[in-house]
Amino acid sequence: MMMVLQPEGLGEGQGPYGGHEYMEQEEDWDRDLLLDPAWEKQQRKTFTAWCNSHLRKAGTQIENIEEDFRNGLKLMLLLEVISGEGGLGGPDVLKDPQGRGAEAGLKGWPEVEGGRWGDGAWTSGSHMCWKDGLALCALIHRHRPDLIDYAKLRKDDPIGNLNTAFEVAEKYLDIPKMLDAEDIVNTPKPDEKAVMTYVSCFYHAFAGAEQAETAANRICKVLAVNQENEKLMEEYEKLASELLEWIRRTVPWLENRTSEPSMSAMQRKLEDFREYRRLHKPPRVQEKCQLEINFNTLQTKLRLSHRPAFMPSEGKLVSDIANAWRGLEQAEKGYEDWLLAEIRRLQRLQHLAEKFRQKASLHETWTRGKEDMLSQRDYESASLQEVRALLRRHEAFESDLAAHQDRVEQIAAIAQELNELDYHDAASVNSRCQAICDQWDSLGTLTQKRRDALERMEKLLETIDQLQLEFARRAAPFNNWLDGAVEDLQDVWLVHSTEETQSLITAHDQFKATLPEADRERGAILGIQGEIQKICQTYGLRPIISNPYISLTPQDITSKWDMVRKLVPSRDQTLQEELARQQANERLRRQFAAQANAIGPWIQGKVEEVGRLAVGLAGSLEEQMAGLRQQEQNIINYKSNVDRLEGDHQLLQESLVFDNKHTVYSMEHIRVGWEQLLTSIARTINEVENQVLTRDAKGLSQEQLNEFRASFNHFDRKRNGMMEPDDFRACLISMGYDLGEAEFARIMTMVDPNAAGVVTFQAFIDFMTRETAETDTAEQVIASFKILAGDKNYITGEQLRRELPSEQAEYCIRRMVAYTGPGAPAGALDYVAFSNALYGESDL
């Protein structure tokens, strides 16, 4: 059986190779070919190869046309395969996808029409353009430059060129070898129909590849968007987790109110807190701000690509982070207040403890030996004069004892206050105070017993020395005054201002003014003793070695007076040093206040200025961004002023200065304002960046953005960057929207999905540009996968790896579920469910 290759549906004189004239010119030559055995052999070989290129898809092939097609079974199978593919109708039919004839189909193919084998190739010796093999190699190189190095081919090696084309086509393009290079080169006029049949296989191979490439490109584009968004989601989750974990670890430390017993330990706690505020917290402030910016950018990208909004893991919403941050700052404020209060308490305790020890030591020194003295029975062998002296001496002691009552009460009061303030060594204070009180009671009892004994003896004794008595009466209070003066001059103080220090200096000056009068009293007392000695000398009495009425001697008075005179200038110097210290503290206060009074209003002004910029941005987005970046740089440059203020604040705290009447701005106010300013400028910049993303993604012009901004600002009555629902309704009506309640409610769910009661400028832009956006849809992605799958409802991993880049192919294979439809092979994947999931809820 022999079949002549003739295009289907073409009448006599209307073939794809010319009209009647051409046919007449070729008639004799064609007749000769029919009688040429070599031509018949070529036809048989070409047809057999063409049939096998289709039959092998059904798992069979033919060896001999006459024998294998004789019973018609394989011929019917061939027709079934061809009709099922929708391709060529047979070796004698060559059509393009629009139904044109063979010549029109191949001439309409740009690679044939515009190549070196262009116009006229098929109507005037088309067989000649394929003879040197360069045309076939160029055709392959046009679509698969990786298979043939066209620059190395030589025109004088036609057989080598043809064999290269045949081998590459069979090995890489699945096109069987239908021709022999020697037959084409050595035949004056190769069979045109055989060449056309072979070339038509390239047409179908490359046409399908281009369609698959287009589909693969669309899928890669969609997958790239999803992969980028998932990466941003993972980065948000990681950053949010780290920030929340840091807050979780930090808050218990700030909530720990365990007091330390010593001032140095509490000072270390305060230094640790300062280091936390100076070194550890600022980077976390930046992380929190960056987290909000990343979240807003991600939501904008999801919205622009018609993906659902990103919902972070439970507990990692921006609002959750903000709540945790507020809890951190509350704990931080409470911790700082507690620290300062504890330091003041310990400072007060330190002062009281020192005062207690000083007064207790003075009292214990005074009481030393008093019990033994009161227990003496010296009056039993004394004369009347001696007894009366003992009695007067005892009266002086009682006077001294009464004068010391205040000191004992002060000691007890200080001990009580130390207990109330939870002094760490209260046990030893209480023990010492109790010993003093017990001894005081014992002294009182012994004093009363001795008085009773002396009064009994007084009735027996009459003689008394009036001068000694006078000495005792005047020396005792003067001695007490001296003791009080010494105590006052050695007293410790706690002041917090120059005014308090000046008050101490004034009191000390008043004390010094009393010294001349005291000096005269001292002279009078010593004069009494001199009179006693004079009387003894005058009347020849035995020298009075001691005063029977008092143990105090003139030498004691002189010694204490000298001590008072020595302590006065020392007290002067100490007070002046304290005054200088308080004046230095005052200078620190004023220095801090001068800076704070400048920085505080500057920060507030910048916050208000950034707020106004957020509402009234003008010019192109790039100009707005440049202006905002300049503002941001100005703010960053101003940071050095805040750092200097932090240094002055630290000097104040190191000097234990916690008040400042010269300013209303505390360091905490400045820090909060500074953090608010940084957050405000960063959020405003992020808003403009999102507008740039929206503009570029939706193709908006600057004029359109300016119109949107002008409309938004006009109806933003409060000038806070947000329209209320009534303002938004008025804006829509002004633009010609016919709004009913139901329609407006529907629109509000679009622009205010969280029911916050406001419409932001970004939501307004999204609404105004929503219907004009051109984005990929799930349906478009499904259609692209269907092309790669050969029009099947499933796709295999092998197909994905062949048609897509490695990264995108593996991405699809990991996420696609198994296809469960009928007739699917093992390993089939469901690309429809995968495509719908791309536009549904995210995994994160």
Image (cartoon, helix red, strand yellow):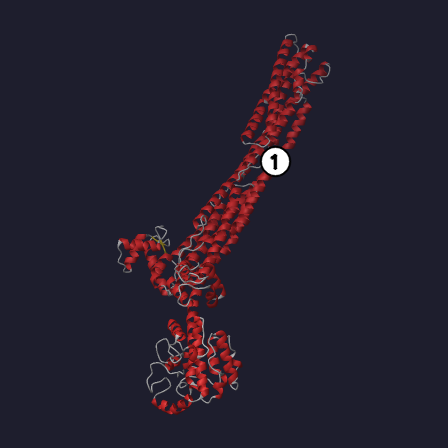
Q: Pick whichever, 721 or 66, lies toward us.
A: 66
Where residue 160 sits in the image (x, y, percent)? Answer: 52, 83
Residue 840 appears in view: yes
User: Which image quarter holds the N terminus?
Assistant: bottom left
Q: In which quarter of the view is residue 820 placed?
A: bottom left
Q: How many marks?
A: 1
> Do we see residue 716 in this rendering?
no
Q: Is residue 176 above or below residue 271?
A: below
Identity, as a three-letter code, of the amino acid under mark 1:
Asp
Viewer-side residue, 410 vs 805: 805
Answer above or below: position of 610 versus 195. above
Give how far across and how far down residue 269 sits, in percent: 57, 41
**Residue 438 position in % (x across, y down):** 60, 21
Foreground of the two, 318 or 504? 318
- Residue highlighted by disc 1: 572
Please state if 480 lies on the left or on the right of 701 as rendered.
right
Residue sitting at x 57%, y 37%: 260
Farthest residue, direction top: 460
Q: Quadrant of residue 391?
A: top right
Q: Position of residue 361 (x, y in %)?
A: 63, 27
Q: Is residue 212 above or below residue 751?
A: below
- Judge the density around disc 1: few (<14), some (14-19), many (≥20) Cα neighbours within 10 Å: some
What element does badge 1 sit on?
Answer: helix
Quadrant into which the C terminus falls: bottom left
